[in-house]
Image (cartoon, grey):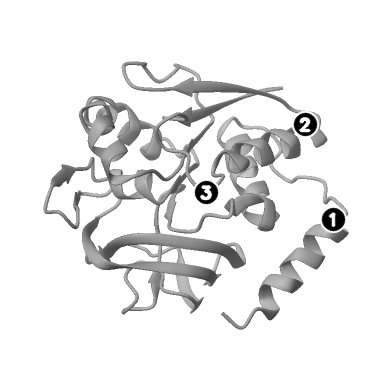
């Protein structure tokens, strides 16, 4: 079965190896006998009619300003996909752009599309380091955060999880990321999915279930991943 994966702004929003999330999904889909196809969607491109899963990465504030108008143009279609249950993973900059607005440290206003009821204000100190986040749906997630934005959740907006180590959305309230239907926003780089295969498989399962296909994936024996996660869990900072 063909699985249509959309990678938004792969040239502009791809810091800290976020494209590794795409590579992870492709390989894990192939191991399960699926035929994943990637649609690279940049500025001026339309989202494909067939979309099963959407990815976006992080980028510089200047890159977010460059793509702002295009994100707003795509806003209605992205909202429709979210309401249709399409799984999404939006990291850092694209998380902010799918929020309501981002005001940079320099005071520039970047409007978002409001998939997530969040607002981000740039701070004068970057929040950097290894992070661990406890989630209800995906267990403990490990990643690396590096952002100046302080993101606040609106009333009723579900967080992705609670911070076990690191700063999360803003370094103050203990929340990390956001979730709306099957769309996930997070500050966790790494890239995130190689170290967190439960989340990767959950995104694939959600995509399959939405297509009416069997969503339970065969487990994969991954000793190297387990060693990597044990190392991440033992870090003191």
Instruction: Name the residue at 20% across, 28% down.
Output: 69
120 displayed left or right of 48: left
Q: Is residue 138 visible?
A: yes
Q: Nearer the viewer, mark 2 or mark 3?
A: 3
Between discs 1 and 3, the one toward the N terminus? 3
Local crowd size for mark 3, using a 10 Å CA cut-off: few (<14), some (14–19), many (≥20)? some
Local crowd size for mark 1, using a 10 Å CA cut-off: few (<14), some (14–19), many (≥20)? few
For disc 3, the marked residue is: 16
Q: Is residue 156 visible?
A: no
Numbered tag placed on residue 222 in the rendering = 1
Instruction: Name the residue at 75% across, 64% down.
Output: 228
For disc 2, the marked residue is: 30
How far, Cα to Cα, is label 1 from label 3? Answer: 23 Å
Which of the 4 quarters of the picture holds residue 73? top left
Instruction: Name the residue at 72% across, 67% down.
Output: 229
Q: Quadrant of the C terminus?
A: bottom right
In this view, the residue in front, 101 or 202, is: 101
108 displayed left or right of 225: left
Which of the 4 quarters of the picture holds residue 141? bottom right
Check the image and report above or below for 22 versus 216. Answer: above
Check disc 1 and report its element: helix, strand or loop: loop
How far, Cα to Cα, is label 1 from label 2? Answer: 16 Å
Instruction: Name the residue at 44% across, 67% down.
Output: 128
Residue 61 pos. (x, y %): 28, 45
Local crowd size for mark 2, using a 10 Å CA cut-off: few (<14), some (14–19), many (≥20)? few
Q: Quadrant of the N terminus?
A: top right
How far, Cα to Cα, is label 2 from label 3? Answer: 24 Å
33 displayed left or right of 29: right
């Amino acid at each position: 079965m063909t699985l249509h994966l959309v990678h938004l702004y792969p040239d502009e929003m791809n810091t800290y190896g976020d494209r590794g999330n795409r590579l992870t999904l492709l390989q894990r889909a192939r191991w399960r006998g699926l035929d994943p196809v990637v649609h690279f969607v940049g500025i001026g491109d339309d989202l494909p009619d067939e979309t099963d899963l959407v990815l976006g990465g992080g980028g510089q504030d200047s890159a977010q300003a460059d793509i702002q108008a295009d994100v707003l143009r795509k806003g209605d279609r992205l909202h429709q996909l979210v309401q249709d249950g399409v799984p999404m993973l939006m990291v850092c900059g694209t998380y902010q752009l799918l929020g309501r607005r981002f005001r940079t440290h320099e005071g520039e206003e970047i409007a978002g599309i409001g998939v997530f009821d969040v607002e981000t204000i740039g701070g004068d100190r970057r929040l950097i380091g290894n992070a661990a986040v406890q989630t209800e749906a995906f267990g403990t997630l490990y990643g690396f955060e590096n952002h100046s934005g302080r993101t606040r959740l609106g009333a009723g907006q579900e967080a992705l999880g609670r911070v076990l180590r690191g700063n999360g959305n803003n370094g103050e309230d203990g929340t990390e990321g956001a979730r709306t239907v099957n769309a996930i926003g997070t500050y966790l780089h790494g890239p995130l999915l190689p170290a967190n295969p439960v989340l990767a498989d959950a995104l694939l399962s959600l995509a399959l279930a939405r297509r009416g296909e069997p969503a339970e994936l065969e487990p994969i024996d991954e000793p190297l991943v387990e060693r990597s996660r044990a190392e991440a869990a033992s870090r003191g900072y």
